Amino acid sequence: MYQSISTSMNRKQIFLQGIKDVLPLNIPVVLFGIFYAVLCIELGFSSIFTIGTSLIIFAGGSQLIFITLLTAGAVPWVIFGSVIMNNTRNILYGAVFSKYIEKKNALWKLTLSFFLTDQCFAVSNQYLKKNYKQKFSHYHMLGSGITVWIIWQLSNLVGIWLGNVVSDQLSLNFFVAITFLALIAKDLGKLDHFLVILVSAICSLIFYNLPLKAYVIVSAAGGIILAYIINKKFKKILK
């Protein structure tokens, strides 16, 4: 009896620690969630569609790419390919976390994979490195992931409510551009990251007139190829 209560408390404590650790990283999530929802409303999507994409897809950048290309009339394979390429980092996240949850059942793996975001990875990876031997260490991932998910949904609701006001008075395209610049600003000071961003931007300008909005995939591919070359050949030089 006493042992089961103690175990339950340990789960709860680890879960709450995940919430506590990830909360400071959610300011950009709130802003981006509001901007995404407002943009959906401005583009003519319904509130149900806006919330539905967030409940199911739950990937801010990919959701923005999805609705932008959908509105622009891009063909399905371009939309699908762009969303997949935007989420390639999640494959790396999953590879890192796999060693921590390899003994968990399929339901746990699917659940934690769904809630795996940049913020969740940042805090839970640090925690699991130090506490991976704890039986319930994965509850930290669950706590941090659910927290980000709830904040994202609430931000979307605020954005839907503000949609008409913002779209009438301010340019959403401006806000989206500023939001993405804020997301990559921290990487501009690293030479290798700056070069990848620069090449992707140049490719997008050069290939902008490609049919079916394919410049999105071409520019992303150009950045990924350069990142691979730098990582293999010039990592020590550009550190």
Image (cartoon, helix red, strand yellow):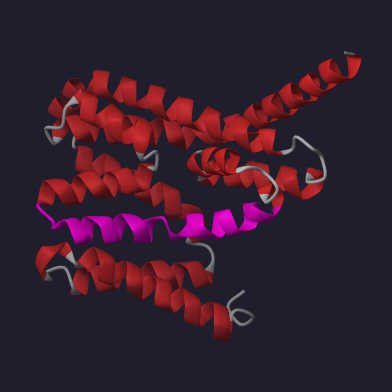
Which quadrant: the C terminus? Answer: bottom right
Name of the residue lying farthest toward the right: 2
The reply, left or right, for residue 219 in relation to residue 127 is left
The residue sitting at 70% across, 50% down in the picture is 100
**Residue 217 belongs to magenta span:** no
The residue sitting at 72% across, 22% down in the picture is 12
The answer to whether residue 199 shows anywhere in this view is no
Which quadrant: the N terminus? Answer: top right
List x then y, in percent, for residue 8: 77, 20
Q: Nearer the viewer, residue 99 or 153?
A: 99
Q: In this view, does 232 lie above or below 191?
A: below
Name of the residue lying farthest toward the bottom: 233
The reply, left or right, for residue 138 in relation to residue 80 is right
Q: In this view, does 61 lie above or below 236?
A: above
The reply, left or right, for residue 227 in relation to residue 206 is right
Occupied quadrant, residue 211: bottom left
The residue sitting at 18% across, 29% down in the picture is 41
Q: Nearer the viewer, residue 152 or 133?
A: 133
Occupied quadrant, residue 158: top left
Q: Is the magenta stretch mostly helix, strand or loop?
A: helix
List x then y, in percent, for residue 13: 75, 24
List x then y, in percent, for residue 87: 41, 55
Q: Give the range drawn in magenta.
A: 73-99
Q: Nearer the viewer, residue 131 or 219?
A: 131
**Number of numbered labels in the structure image:** 0
Occupied quadrant, residue 199: bottom left
